[in-house]
Amino acid sequence: KQEVTQIPAALSVPEGENLVLNCSFTDSAIYNLQWFRQDPGKGLTSLLLIQSSQREQTSGRLNASLDKSSGRSTLYIAASQPGDSATYLCAVPNFGNEKLTFGTGTRLTIIP
Amino acid sequence: DTGVSQNPRHKITKRGQNVTFRCDPISEHNRLYWYRQTLGQGPEFLTYFQNEAQLEKSRLLSDRFSAERPKGSFSTLEIQRTEQGDSAMYLCASSSGTGFATQYFGPGTRLTVL
């Protein structure tokens, strides 16, 4: 059974700093990995989907990396802004039905 | 394309009452998923549809829960005889194609059972 872990559970950094969020998964036989953002009381917004054949995927100030063999992914946020404050979740799909298994998320606070 | 929509956004009910939620996926998305999220946790899979067929149900989905997707368009999730433990955010997502496509999530329905 796939298990997804995100550490730390919460992170506070001053505005302008670069930061890294971590995601680890137990079963390395994944097809892809998806990073989401969730604002308080809201639904999930897809940020990046990185295929298992890729090592990196970039969108603006966000960069996601994937190391299948070690069961790890990172989300790098450059030049953080207060608007980046949210909970960030990573998820991997199961083979066959593509249902997503999520981590518990990292709650990020950017301090102005 | 207006994205995935869910109604209602909030529902407060008394224990023992029945509730029904609706999800409208992105048009022409053939797959539709329901997840449940409790405070401080990531979403957990409940069930999913490919077109109108319900292909899998999680063990989290007790016999008080039922989901439908008539005609392969919108979906409804009904909870009968609600319990306080049902209080959660219920999220719907849709995706297209047959591969591992990006899932797009709706805003969720927040259920509070008193």
Image: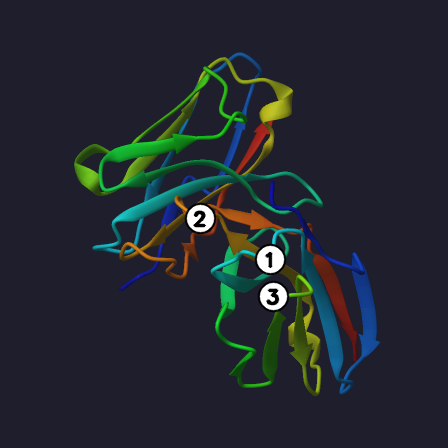
Res. B47 image quadrant: top left
For label 2, the residue is A95
Circles 1 and 3, Cβ within 8 Å, touching? The answer is: yes
Circles 3 and 2, Cβ within 8 Å, touching? The answer is: no
State the image coordinates of residue A27 (x, y, percent, origin top left).
61, 52
Q: Nearer the viewer, residue A4 or B26?
A: A4
Count the numbered circles shown: 3
Residue A28's mark? 1
State the image coordinates of residue A48 (x, y, percent, origin top left).
51, 71
The residue under the point 50% across, 68% down is: A52
Q: As shown in the figure, which amino acid type bears the numbered disc 2? A: Phe
Q: Is residue B114 visible?
A: no
Q: Residues within 10 Å of mark 2 (few under 14, many from 20)?
A: few
State the image coordinates of residue A54 (x, y, percent, origin top left).
50, 76
Q: Is residue B2 visible?
A: yes
Residue A68's mark? 3
Counting residues from the start of the chain, the first of labels 3 and 2 encountered is 3
Image position of B91 (left or right of A87): left
Residue B70's mark? none
Q: Alpha carbon of mark 2 to alpha carbon of mark 1: how far?
A: 12 Å
Image position of B25 (left or right of A60): left
Q: Alpha carbon of mark 1 to alpha carbon of mark 3: how far?
A: 5 Å
Q: Chain of mark 1?
A: A
Image position of B62 (left or right of B72): right
